[in-house]
Image: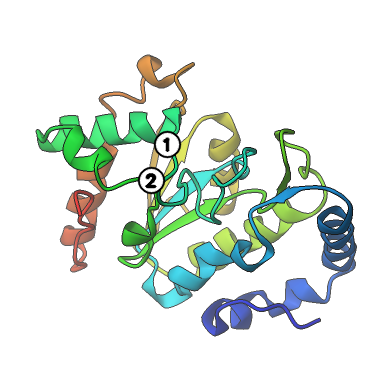
Amino acid sequence: MDVKIDPSWKKRLKGEFDEPYFKDLTEFVREEYKNETVYPPPKSIFRAFELCPFDKVKVVILGQDPYINKGEANGLSFAVNEGVRIPPSLLNIYKEIAAEYDVPLESLTAKGGDLSRWATQGVLLLNATLTVRAKLSNSHQGKGWERFTDAAIRALSEEREHLVFMLWGRYAKEKGAHIDWEKHLILESPHPSPFSAASGFFGNGHFKKANEYLEEHGEKPIDWLT
């Protein structure tokens, strides 16, 4: 099966593409796009992998599934398309960065919500489920995407060293089972959702901690303020 994905990722994940579960997943997604409104647009399904090749990954930020409203989902976890109102979880992420770096929140919100500027620096903004039906959160869970993204995380854990994994909320923390905690930095906290941000996401210091770890291991830090 020919899946259009960055060659560096295709090399590591090619075994998944021929698995029965992935064939079933492909057929399910194809039918969903044919009969329902599904996000993100087909060309953006693997955008996280396209913008952040395997060998360039420094930080992994895990989300759950794409946004369910028109024009929002763009293939990157927590991100939205340019010109779209910044959603609450991303706004809380910006609030935490602004607090850590003592900058005005407006300096971040003015840049909009398309986080490709982070992805191209080595931040893999990966949702556990890469597609979703409009207006129906979690509608494509349990169809195979989780197994595929587990394989991507496992490949990073096994082949790379000194990566930073930001696991926010229960769903993301479950992915920690596929990561070697001895080789990488695992940062856990509650989810940045308005329902949980005040219970431990705010004040977690993850963005500075990530950069300190990267610098300790000879890597260029991420410019979260760009």
Q: Image point 72% across, 40% down: which residue?
A: 134
Q: Is 51 rendered above or below residue 139?
A: below
Q: Residues within 10 Å of mark 1 (few under 14, many from 20)?
A: few
Q: Do the residues labelled 1 and 2 touch (CB within 8 Å)?
A: yes
Q: What residue type is labelled 1?
A: Arg
| Residue 82 on image: x %, y % | 41, 51
Residue 91 visible in the current orientation: yes
Q: Is 188 rendered above or below residue 154?
A: above
Instruction: Please tell me whether mark 1 sits on a helix, a strand or a loop.
Output: loop
| Residue 219 on image: x %, y % | 21, 67
The scheme the figure's colours follow is rainbow
Q: Which of 59 and 107 is in front in this view?
A: 107
Determine which of the numbered discs, if any, sits on residue 85 in the image: 1
Instruction: Please tell me whether mark 2 sits on a helix, a strand or a loop.
Output: loop
Q: What residue type is labelled 2?
A: Gly
- Mark 2 highlights which residue? 113
Callout count:
2
Of callouts 1 and 2, the N-terminal one: 1
